[in-house]
Image (tube, rainbow, N blue to C red):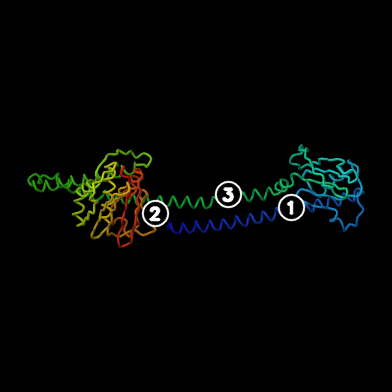
């Protein structure tokens, strides 16, 4: 399964999960609203039963709703015509609540319009009360033109939420399961990417070292033969081959270890003042064998003004080596333009080539460790995918900036901006 397919699966899964979560929240809200209405209906039924138990109002049965006011979610105001005894009212009210499963604790008060005050207040706990000891609740006096019973349910919302415990638990469990799915897919995608990078690294590592070792083995087989002693020119030739391949392997090993062990937080810089133009000329001299082998043309467009920067010269030299090597290796007939400029307290280095270029979708990955741009043949150009990662770390350690502009089949330009001091 390709990485692009995994990305689409991850995106599609995320959309589906968002839809499922939205639907679940919608139905949870619907159930909560239903329980709220059911609670209100049960309170009204309890009040109807209370009117049947004790004589507190003369009214037609069809006018019950007019006697009950519901100003807010937790409050019910019941109009009455006569004042019932406290014990009778509390006894029958608790009984009706139990019959109609109104199991949330209630603060009840009876207001007498004649004396214009509450005659008594009672706290009515139930078996399912959340806080049965919480009795100190002050109820406001409503100046109405009739006597009334004030019913206040302080924990009504918590009671309904408690009734929905199974729904809420199931929803939370569903959320965890659904959230675990994209997390798992993302983890698998990340692991697959790492496996691909590891596989590419092993392939490149094998290819990079196999050829020099094979050449060294052939040369050493010739050198151990007795006839070679009588052929000094051939002896020198094969000794030189072994020396060159050994130096090549040593360079690659040092490069590999230096890059692999370099971390942005532990990159130690030994800054000195030096002329970057002279340093670039030295690098070109070092790369002369590669330049001749590839018949590369190097166009130096160095700023003629004398410039001195404060930086770690060995590290900056390796940065230039990596960029110029890549520019040469990824071009059929290499033309590398190296330009410098200094202005506004910054030094700018540009390395431009006429190579194969880099597609836009790969640009954001090129500085990752072990990353190599996929091609038809992974071994068509040697390397470990460490060079640009090292370049980025060195530039960042110097508080500089590196940018890349590339057009496939036209070429690539790497531009580095460093503070001069």
- Label 3: element kind: helix
Residue at the bottom extreme?
A: 409
| Other residues around mark 2 within 10 Å, as few (<14) / some (14–19) / many (≥20) | few
In this rendering, the label closer to the viewer, 3 or 2: 2
Mark 3 sits on what residue?
Answer: 176
Q: Is residue 259 above or below residue 380?
A: above
> Relative to 48, is 259 on the left or the right?
left
Question: Which residue is painted at 47% across and 50% down in the image?
Answer: 187
Asked if the residue at tag 1 contacts the one at tag 2, i.e. Cβ–Cβ closer than 8 Å, the answer is: no
> Which numbered circle lies on residue 364?
2
- Label 1: element kind: helix
- Which sits earlier in the primary sequence, circle 3 or circle 2? 3
Name the spot of residue 251 as percent of width and height, x first.
25, 44
Foreground: 364 or 311? 311
Asked if the residue at tag 1 contacts the one at tag 3, i.e. Cβ–Cβ closer than 8 Å, the answer is: no
Asked if the residue at tag 2 contacts the one at tag 3, i.e. Cβ–Cβ closer than 8 Å, the answer is: no
- Label 2: element kind: loop
Name the spot of residue 216 as percent of width and height, x first.
20, 47
């Amino acid at each position: 399964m390709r990485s692009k397919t995994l990305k689409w699966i991850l995106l599609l899964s995320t959309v589906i999960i968002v839809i499922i979560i939205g639907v679940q929240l919608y139905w949870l809200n619907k159930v909560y609203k239903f329980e709220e209405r059911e609670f209100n209906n049960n309170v009204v039924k309890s009040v109807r039963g209370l009117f049947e138990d004790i004589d507190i109002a003369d009214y037609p049965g069809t006018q019950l709703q007019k006697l009950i006011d519901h100003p807010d979610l937790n409050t019910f105001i019941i109009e009455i015509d006569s004042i019932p005894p406290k014990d009778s009212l509390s006894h029958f009210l608790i009984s009706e609540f139990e019959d109609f499963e109104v199991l949330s604790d209630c603060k009840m008060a009876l207001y007498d319009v004649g004396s214009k005050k509450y005659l008594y207040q009672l706290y009515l706990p139930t078996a399912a009360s959340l806080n049965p000891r919480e009795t100190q609740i002050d109820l406001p006096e409503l100046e109405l033109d009739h006597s009334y019973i004030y019913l206040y349910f302080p924990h009504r919302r918590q009671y309904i939420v408690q009734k929905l415990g199974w729904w809420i638990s199931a929803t939370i469990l569903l959320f965890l399961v659904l959230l675990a799915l994209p997390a798992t897919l993302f983890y698998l995608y990340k692991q697959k990417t790492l496996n691909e990078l590891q596989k590419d690294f092993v392939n490149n590592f094998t290819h990079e070292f196999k050829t020099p070792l094979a050449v060294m083995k052939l040369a050493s087989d010739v050198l151990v033969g007795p006839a070679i002693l009588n052929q000094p020119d051939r002896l020198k030739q094969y000794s030189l081959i072994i020396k060159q391949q050994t130096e090549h392997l040593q360079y690659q090993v040092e490069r590999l270890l230096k890059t692999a062990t370099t971390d942005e937080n532990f990159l130690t810089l030994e800054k000195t003042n030096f002329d970057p133009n002279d340093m670039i000329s030295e690098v070109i001299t070092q790369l002369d064998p590669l330049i001749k082998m590839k018949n590369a043309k190097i166009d130096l467009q160095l700023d003629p003004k004398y410039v001195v920067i404060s930086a770690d010269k060995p590290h900056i030299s390796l940065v230039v080596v990596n960029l110029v090597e890549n520019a040469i290796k990824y071009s059929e007939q290499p033309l590398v333009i190296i330009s410098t400029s200094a202005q506004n307290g910054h030094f700018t280095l540009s390395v431009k080539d006429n190579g194969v270029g880099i597609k836009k979708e790969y640009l954001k990955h090129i500085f990752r460790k072990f990353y190599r741009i996929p091609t038809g043949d992974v071994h068509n150009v040697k390397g470990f995918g460490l060079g640009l990662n090292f370049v980025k770390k060195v530039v960042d350690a110097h508080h500089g900036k590196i940018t890349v502009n590339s057009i496939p089949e036209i070429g690539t330009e790497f531009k580095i901006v460093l503070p001069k001091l």
